[in-house]
Amino acid sequence: MAVTGTLVFAVLSAALSSFLFGYNIGVINAPRVIVAQWIRRVHCERDGGTYQTTPPPPGEENSTTIWCRYYDEASAGKIMFTDNTMLNTLWSLVSAIFCLGALIAAMSLSFFVNRFGRKGTMLINNVTAIAGAVCMLLSYYVMSHELLIVGRFIIGLNAGLNSGAPPMYLTEIAPASLRGAIGSVHQLVIVVGVLISQILGLPFILGSETLWPILFGFSLVPAALQLLTLSFCPESPRHLYLNRNDVDGARKALDFFQRTSDVTADMDQMKREHEESRDQPKVTMTDIFRDRFLRRIMLICIMVMLSQQFSGINAVMFYSTAIFTSAGMVGVHAQYATVAMSSIFVVASTIACLVVDKLGRRILLLAGLIGMCITTILLVVFMKLMINEGMEWASYASVFSVILFVVFFAYGPGPIPWFLASELFTQGPRAPATSVVAGVNWLSTLIITFTFPLIESNLNEYTFLIFTTCLVGFIVYTYMKVPETKGKRIDEIQAEMRQRL
């Protein structure tokens, strides 16, 4: 089927939710030191102290108050945090509260997408994006790091719903021949959002002492734009037919996306699925784990999502600047390297969108996992040579290994876990299954966010060997259990799965 202008419009509009998701993952990275210094200033002034922005004159001591003392650029990135455990805890909270909000929202995803629809959930979710952005923007002007934390929690709620609603909508409006490509758009636009947040976070753009609130409040723009554009798109035809029994609405939605009056094949397929599920009770998350067949499919989806998260990708994305600094890059050069990495990530994700319906999901997953496993080993070797042997070339080889890791991730383990549940499950269990997968994603992210700094401080260059071990297990599981879904209808996939399981 040819790609229509209306389908492209709907995909781009829905993908603004994916952009918000990615932007708010990446926005915390670049301005870490500047925002932490602002938190110190807030505490210093609350305690009645004078915040020192310049070195003390010769003969005078630096402030004895950890909230007020001066740190030069070289020491601000690390010593400032090690000197002040309370600051370190507050910054961890700013980072982790986002994941907690996302986890809570992800577990309620099934309710929202069934009650309000896929499109309706995305539209409603823009309210949380606007509220969170306003809180973070205002926190600077009212000198309240508590308001910043509240804003990060609210924007986390937005990310939680955006981790499931967009891929469901994209997969359900896509024809079978383009389902992989359109489903992969979610991950592509996530990394575009990460890249834009990192570019805007550079010191000479919005990553400065006075402009970082605008960086955090930028989510207002895509949220407002989606409210304007997605309102002109219809709801998913599958949701209209199978959830609301709105046959005419489903036909009109198909006409909109396909720009043709001949939608008989799609309508007949949905009719068959509707008749099969009509007498079945409503499926909940609990029901999925009680049913032997659904439970086994759910396990596949969970394991594929875990392979994404415990590959080490979130450790790379959340702490990319710190990793490049450890690899020998100093100051803003580490931020430039992070931006370059994200740019390559976008290119690789674009290529993945183009080939996923030709090469298939299974082969891309396996190739990506194997490539990531090899590059984590290389990263450990190069970082050991750099740190212990002082080999300068090894620092650049470490950066290259990180970039190669991201490329392999983008080809399979990045995009495929987001839409696999929508391909393996029929309409009834699809929403609760997607909710479980999204919840697993954010629980994993929360674990990685809290544990990676601790693991890194104890294991140093051997940190990524933990992810190597995980990747070996995921490679074996994917080879043994994950089916190919390329170009197949939902009923065909289900029939094959019943034979396999």
Image: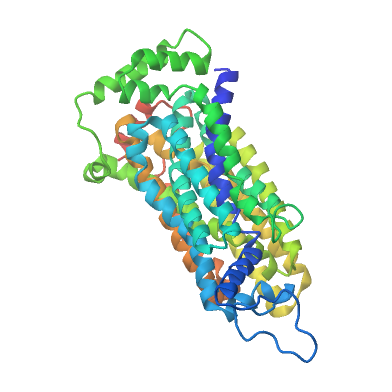
Looking at the image, which residue is at 50% across and 55% down?
Answer: 152
Extreme residue toward the top, this view = 261
Displayed quadrant of residue 221: top right
Please give the count of numbered marks on the rendered protein. 0
Judged left or right of residue 35, residue 270 is left
What colour scheme has been applied to the protein in the rendered image?
Answer: rainbow
- Residue 178's place in the image compared with 300, above or below, is above
Displayed quadrant of residue 424: top left
Closest to the observer: 61 or 13? 61
Q: Position of residue 273 (x, y in %)?
A: 30, 22
Looking at the image, which residue is at 70% across and 50% down?
Answer: 199
- Residue 429's place in the image compared with 436, above or below, is above
Extreme residue toward the bottom, this view = 59
Q: Quadrant of the C terminus?
A: top left
Q: Quadrant of the N terminus?
A: top right
Extreme residue toward the right, this view = 58
Closest to the observer: 447 or 347? 447
Q: Where is residue 160 in the image (x, y as percent from the top left)?
A: 44, 47
Looking at the image, which residue is at 40% across and 39% down?
Answer: 421
Look at the image and tell me whether residue 475 can be seen: no
Q: Where is residue 94 in the image (x, y as percent from the top left)?
A: 51, 62
Q: Where is residue 361 in the image (x, y as percent from the top left)?
A: 50, 38
Judged left or right of residue 289, residue 158 is right
Displayed quadrant of residue 64: bottom right
Looking at the image, which residue is at 56% across and 19% down?
Answer: 6
Look at the image and tell me whether residue 372 can be seen: yes
Extreme residue toward the front, this view = 48
